Image (spheres, rainbow, N blue to C red):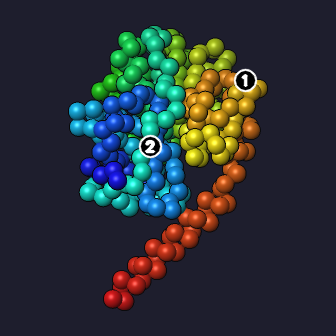
Amino acid sequence: MYKIINAKFLAPNIKRFVIEAPKIALKRKAGQFVIIRIKDGGERIPLTIADSDTLAGTITIIVQGIGKTTTELNTLNSGDAILDVVGPLGKPSHIENFGTAISIGGGVGTAIAYPTAVALKAAGNHTISIIGGRSKEFVILEDEMKKVCDEVYPTTDDGSYGFHGFVTQKLKELIDSGTKIDFVLAIGPIPMMKAVADTTRPYGIKTVVSLNPIMVDGTGMCGGCRATVDNKTVFVCVDGPEFDAHLVDFKTLERRNKTYRDSEAESLHDYKCYLDQIFEANLKN
């Protein structure tokens, strides 16, 4: 069992967990993830390690409650425990002194971009971060990014905070202003990562995306995370999760990401019905 040291909501349905896992904290590197299982018989899900503290022996994950298991996970609180936490898994981010490096996070993707931004700064890069959300309440980790980045630009779709527009529009604005950009990391929904790749491709800017959204079991055995990169088949969880954005077949990736959508929606519906039954039973008692 892995004790939850601290659990706190950062935004609606987005929760930060600090978990006691000293061996993982000691070995993890930016870009890697863990597989967790809440309880016996539960689903195994991959989650990126957002941060770690080797002295405290803890790792941090940030979870958006979308499906059944992530929604259930977000009901846990400080003092509770998670049955299994396995990792670190996946290949670490490739880090070097590129020059000027931009980390782009869309929604909860900011949590995945954060550890790489930390590593890029430590490698001597001039670091810029563009963090996006549908509205102000969905912009997360701004303060944390400001501590490790030379420039931070929050963006919101509705204009309620920061730059009014998408992260790609802010990126294009920086490019058009003459900012010399040597490297871009983009993490978020697949359409957003595709849009970033389309934005940087004409300028020949080295761009990397993390294909975490398509991962399933995290071991390469289920085959659910097959993707096409440079006209070759890869398994995101073992060959990545980060790849050259300009070589990713996003059209195929988007189709594959929809494979389990109906099953996931059914599981979430059943879980919410179960919670409603418990609530009604408690009211009667």
For this rendering, which residue is in front, 89 or 128? 89
How would you rate the neighbour count of disc 1 (Cα within 10 Å): few for under 14, some for 14-19, many for 20 or more? Answer: some
Side (left or right) of 161 relative to 209: left
Quick check: 143 above or below 122?
below
Marks 2/1: CA–CA distance: 30 Å
Residue at position x 59%, y 47% in the image: 216
Q: Position of residue 164 (x, y in %)?
A: 48, 37
- Answer with mark 2 or mark 1, whichever residue precedes in sequence: 2
Q: Amino acid at mark 2?
A: Val
Q: Quadrant of residue 205?
A: top right
Residue 30 seen by the camera: yes
Labels 2 & 1 near each other (Cβ < 8 A): no
How would you rate the neighbour count of disc 2 (Cα within 10 Å): few for under 14, some for 14-19, many for 20 or more? Answer: some
Residue at position x 66%, y 20% in the image: 201
Residue at position x 55%, y 64% in the image: 268
Q: Position of residue 146 (x, y in %)?
A: 32, 28
Side (left or right) of 237 relative to 118: right
Q: Amino acid at mark 1?
A: Asp
Say which residue label 1 marks: 230
For this rendering, which residue is in front, 173 or 280? 280
Quick check: 119 above or below 138?
above
Residue 170 seen by the camera: no
Side (left or right) of 83 relative to 249: left
Tag on residue 86? Answer: 2
